[in-house]
Image (cartoon, coloured by chain):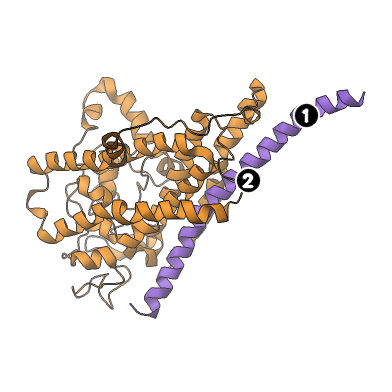
Amino acid sequence: MDWQDITLFGKKILIGIGLALAPVLILLGSLNLAQRVLAAKTHSPQSSQQAK
Amino acid sequence: MKMEISVRRKVARQLLWSAGIYALPVVLMFVAFAVTGQRPWTQTLPLSTTIPASHLQRFLHDYWLAFFVLALGVVEFACGLYEARWTRNERFLDSASFAVPYVITGPAIAYFSAKFLPLLLPGLHNRFVWVPFFWGFLIICIGDDLTQYWYHRLHHQIPWLWRFHRTHHSAPYMGMAMASRQNVWYTIFFSQIYATAALVYLGFGRSAAVALVIKSLITALAHSSIPWDKPLYRYPALHPVAWVLERLISTPATHHAHHADTSEDGVGYYKGNFGNMLFLWDVLFGTAHISRQYPKAYGITHYHGDPWYAQFMWPVFKSNIEGSELAAHGPIVKEDIRETASDLSVEGWARTEA
C-alpha cells in the first residue's frame, strides 16, 4: 500500500458515505416535513373552533 | 483517467432525479393519509413483535440464506455448471467472499447500529415505527435498492473505483458463488447496508426484514446459473408476465448479460443492467438492455487468474500478473481486447468489461 492507495481508499469511503447519507437524510426530512404539515392541518380547524 | 464530461453530467442529473425518487413513497403515503384522514403516528404501537424462538429456529433464521445459497451451489456443481473453470484459485476467492458477510460485515453493521447510530441520530430511535408495513416496505425497497444501484453503477462508471469491483466480474462462469464474490472493501463499504441499518434504527425493522429476504432471493437467483426465467420467454402465453418481470426485477437473463465478456453481440451488456433487486432503475435511467438471451461467455477477456488474495484484498495485496489492473503499476482500466477504442470514446465508458 502506498500513499496513492490510501488516497484512493479515502475517496472511496467519502463516496460511500455520501451515497449512504443521502437517502437517510431525504427520507428523514420528507417524513418529518410531511408529518408536521398533516399534523398542522389537523390541528388548525380545532384551534379556530376553540377561538370562537 | 477521468470520467467523460457527458457521462459526468448524465450521472449528476440522474442523481438529482434519484433524490425525488427516494422521497416519492413518503409523498404518496402522506397523500393517502390526507385523503383517508388516517393519522397513524397518533396511535401507540407495540415496538416489538418478536416471537420467542428456539436456538435452532434462531440459527435457521440468521443463516437461512447461507443454506439456500449453499444448497443451490451444490446443485449447480453437481450439474457440472462450473465445468473445469472453477480452479483452486477461484474456489479460494469465492469461499473467502462468501464468508465475509457473515464474519466481518454482519458484526460491523451490528456495531455501527449499536454504537454510532444513537450518536448520529440522537432521539430518533423508532421515531417512525408507526409507518404502516406496506409503505415501510416501499420506502426500504427504494431506499436500499436505489442506493445499491448507484453504488454499483459508480464502480463501473468512475474509472478509479472500477478495481474495487473488478473481482465480481473476473470469473469466467456464473453461479451462486458469484453473488457474494467481491473485493472485501467493496463489501465492507456497501453504502446501502449502512443506509438500511439507519432506516431500521428509525423504526422500519419489520418492513426491512421482509424486503431484504425478497432482495436476497432475487439477487441470488439472478446470479445463479439456473435459468428460471427461460420458460417465460418460451411460451407466448407467459410473455406478458415476462415483459413485466424483466422490467421490474433482475432476472438471470438481464443480469447474466451484465456479466458477459462482450457488449458487441447484442446479448451481453456490461455497460448497463446494474440493478440488483429492481431492474426498474436501469429502465428509468436508460442503462437497461433486454435481449431474453444468455451470453456465450462471461468474465473479462484480459483476465489471467490474478491470485485470489490480490482480488480479495486489493489494494492491500497486489497481483503478480504483469499488466493486470490489480498489479503494482498496472493500468487503472485495461481495454478489453474485443472492444475498439472508437467505440469506447463514443460511449464514454471508463471500462470496457464493466
**Mark 1 residue type:** His
The residue shown at (81%, 29%) is A44
Query: What residue do we see at 19% from left, 74% from top?
Result: B320
The residue identified by callout 2 is A29
Q: Nearer the viewer, residue B143 or B157?
A: B143
Residue B300 lies, with reference to residue B307, above or below; the image says: above
Give the mark nearest the N terminus, 2 or 1.
2
**Which chain: orange?**
B
- The chain carrying label 2 is A
Does B258 sit left or right of A30 as displayed?
left
Which part of the image, by quadrant, shows the N terminus of chain B? bottom left
* Residue at 58 percent of width and 36 percent of height: B26
- Which amino acid, by three-letter code, is at mark 2? Gly
Nearer to us: label 2 or label 1:
1
Q: Position of residue B136 (x, y in %)?
A: 51, 34
Residue B13 drawn at (x, y percent): 54, 52
Q: Looking at the figure, which quarter contains the C terminus of chain B?
A: bottom left
Q: Tell me the CA gap for discs 2 and 1.
A: 21 Å
Q: Is residue B291 visible?
A: no
Vertical comparison of A28 with B32: above or below: below
